[in-house]
Amino acid sequence: MADHILEMRSITKTFPGVKALSDVTLSVERGEVHAICGENGAGKSTLMKVLSGVYPAGDYEGEILFDGQVVSFGGIRDSEHAGIVIIHQELALVPYLSIAENIFLGSEKRGRFGLIDWNLANAQAADLLRQVGLAENPTTPVGQLGVGKQQLVEIAKALSKDVKLLILDEPTAALNDTDSAHLLGLIRGLKTQGMTSIIISHKLNEIDAIADHTTIIRDGQSVETLDMADESVTVDRIIRGMVGRTLDSYYPERESHPGEEVLRVEDWTVQHPTQDRLVVDHASFDVRAGEVVGIAGLMGAGRTELAMSIFGRSYGTYVEGRIFLHGKETRARSVAEAIDAGIAYATEDRKKYGLNLIDDISRNVSAAALGKLSSRGFVDANEEAREAEDARRSMNIKAPTVKSIVGKLSGGNQQKVVLSKWLLTDPDVLILDEPTRGIDVGAKYEIYTIINKLVAAGKAVVVISSELPELLGICDRVYTLSAGRITGQVPVADATQERLMTLMTQEKELVG
Amino acid sequence: MTRSVGPTSEPQAEDATAQKDVAPAVAKGTGTGDVRGLFTRNLRTSGIYIAFVVIVLLFAFLTDGRLLSPGNVTSIVLQYSYILILAIGMVIVIIAGHIDLSVGSVVAITGAVSAVLVIKQGMPWWVGVLAALVVGLLIGAWQGFWVAYVGIPAFIVTLAGMLLFRGLTLQVLNNVSLSPFPSEYGRIASGFSNGLLGGAGFDLFTVLVFAAAVVAYAYGQFRTRLTRQKYKQSVESFPLFIAKIVAVALVVMAFAWQLATSRGLPYVLVIVAVLIMVYGVVTKRTVFGRQVYAIGGNLAAATLSGVKVKAVNFWIFVNMGFLSAIAGIVYSSRSNGAQPSAGQMFELDAIAAAFIGGAAVTGGVGTVVGAMVGGLIMAVMTNGMTIIGVDQSLQSVVKGLVLLLAVAFDVYNKRRAGSGR
């Protein structure tokens, strides 16, 4: 009988209208490295939030046993007290504080009179840094370290808290190869000292190299737990478990008649705005009129970064690459120029980047096309209202009038407002980033129908999506993106979820 | 009735409460439903008008009617005109999510430059006016440059400007006050159009000008109503429409009568009225105005919609400099000279006017008319308390509390409406 440090039994977590986790079971043995795999949105993060008390006990159904005891955490402090530490993908360090100050933030070493004993803190921090193999002075500000080293500081911080179970969420997503190798070595080293780790990762090769067991989550359910010591468990085997999402949506029929090439991107290369790494690396792709092209990639593959950098260089630092529209090179350096050139980009985060939530439908719809709706700087408010009313009817936006405030609409209707806004700019190419994220099945179908109408009218459409069945259901061709590189191009007739996932998790470019 | 309903007309769960109780009432066209709709829909904007009326009535009562006497109405207009002018620019700055702490100092320096040229150098009065405007525009461009193109928060840039331009005012004036201006210059703020057409005990011209304005307003509203109907947008019911116009006409004509029986139509009121109309159109009808609201409402979304954020921010501050210069001219004209300490605390009055008038601390919300009403609330309160003989220190306490309550009301409203996410 194996010694389990953690058992999560029948965990079910529902959000209004959505079942995020249903009957999930997870057993982690003491002293192992346990990997959790799943597509974007499968429920991995939700499960970890349940475990670490972000969703407090009572907010979910099911039972958590830690160290043989039933536990119910009211918040992160409780779970940390019990010895569970989670290191998030977005590092939670204060850049202006020193390494030691960060490590002991919230658990400062008090000396006499309740003042912080910095000599003690720095000495202990130096010990912890040695443990994680980071040769830095504890008084160095964290902001001066690279992402890889910051990750090690996070682990040192976890170790300072007497951690029994260390959870790493996508620890290597932002790291280069050397830093990743070092980090994986460290996790192995901690394991020999008896530490238990849970690692969430999209990099299946890493999981293959480091994990003892792998639990696969799909559509909010734990599908299976694989023993990685078993010879038959390969990366392909994991992929087979991850995909095969059920078809929960239906896709409207469409006849495909691709025409002339509209957009061609060549060797597009973009650097991260603040870090010294390429986020998009020599990506090339093309879209034809009347064609829907999908871009598939896991979290951190650089999908949104690719799209936004093409859209008037609104992300990162341009390194090289060329964009052709209708065969002619375009040099749109600002969003306004990109819109004029005929490119539209509908963001994946409509609340943050897509809409002015405190304003009404009509003014949101017109926001990107004011040049067209105005003469000599004056907006034709009546024309604007008419266009908005047209959009409300044709898109079936469920709101009593176009004067309704956008922040009060449902997600699906907000998405229709975003689409209306971009259609009003009369683009040749529409890049839709996660167009159906967070909206219900009925609204999804409506969005698909709208996409079909657009391509029927000769537009070229690029769809970025985390849902492989969706890409297979609506696209003509799918490009796969991994670590900023295009790793494959598959006509939808030849595409399967397994094939796409294999390409999406591939580290190096295949020739041919 | 021309209200249009969504095809399946099933409002989403979250907006059902907000719209259901308004929309059906509009459909039936019942007057009471309309009034209720008007208030629930525009609580934050209509609240300010109600507050204004209540405050006017309160102080009219407390001062035994002296507040509304012809002479006092005229002096309120003269005393607060420059705050209203500043508030026009300030509300635009605030809608875009910035703040301007320097306007008081800019009022001082533009007035000082004008005074040096006109009083010391003996140049004609209009040279002083032009020079003040140029200085205002240059200062606006300077501050706009730092905010928009260097990316320094407006709070810091204009705090620096507040010190900078106060210091330069002292330099320009050599630390002494200059006065008096020639009488032409003084007329900008203290002149009246009076006796042009005669009238028995009142100025006929003043009454006619206001009457013409009321007719133009009614006609404009009617035209708007017709086009909105043509484009199948919702309009209020006809009786309510008429009631609204009659109410506005009555208030405006009463105001005109008070002016006409006092000293006639102040020139400065004409300046303020023209500015309000122009900037009302700029904020509501122009692409620039739209972009100001878009930037304040969601900066990221505006950027990704192709709004040239830097240019818009730059021109917002240039405009603020321009309006500060006008306020500086009016103020120097009214005080008939330039003082090193002119305009102190004006920025706070202008900011308070904008916020009391319904501008949101987070940006994206606010109107020129709202800021004007906000400014008038401050004006009536100050004037009323002075008539009663309330101590200066207590006046400050009351004004501070009113500002706090106004913004608290706004925050409470937003939370209730649920649009604050």
Image: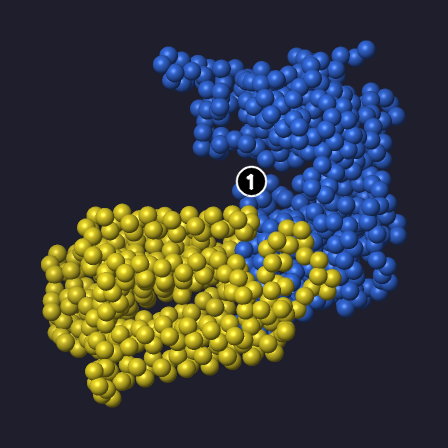
Where is residue A321? Give x, y as percent: 65, 54
- Image vertical order of residue A473 relative to residue A263, above or below: above
- Relative to residue B236, is residue A116 drawn left or right? left
Residue A1 appears in the picture as rendered: yes
Where residue A213 appears, as percent x and y from the top left, is 78, 23
The structure residue drawn at horizontal position 48% and vertical position 24%, both measured from the top left corner, is: A105
Output the chain of dot 1. A
Q: Quadrant of residue A365?
A: bottom right
User: A289 or A85: nearer the eye?
Assistant: A85
Chain whose colour in the figure is yellow: B
Residue A437 falls left or right of residue A336: right
Amino acid under label 1?
Gln
Outermost bottom residue: B197
Depth order, front residue of B263/B257:
B257
Q: Quadrant of the N terminus of chain B?
A: bottom right
Q: In the depicted view, which residue is nearer to us: B157 or B369?
A: B369
Above or below, B67 relative to A172: below
Q: Nearer the viewer, residue A443 or B222?
A: B222
Q: Residue at x 25, y 78 (%)?
A: B260
Pointer 1: what residue?
A275
- The chain whose colour is blue is A
Q: Residue at x 58, y 69 (%)?
A: B30
The vertical placement of A101 against A291, above or below, is: above
Label 1 sits on a secondary structure element that is loop
Where in the figure is residue B319, as x and y percent of width and height?
A: 37, 65
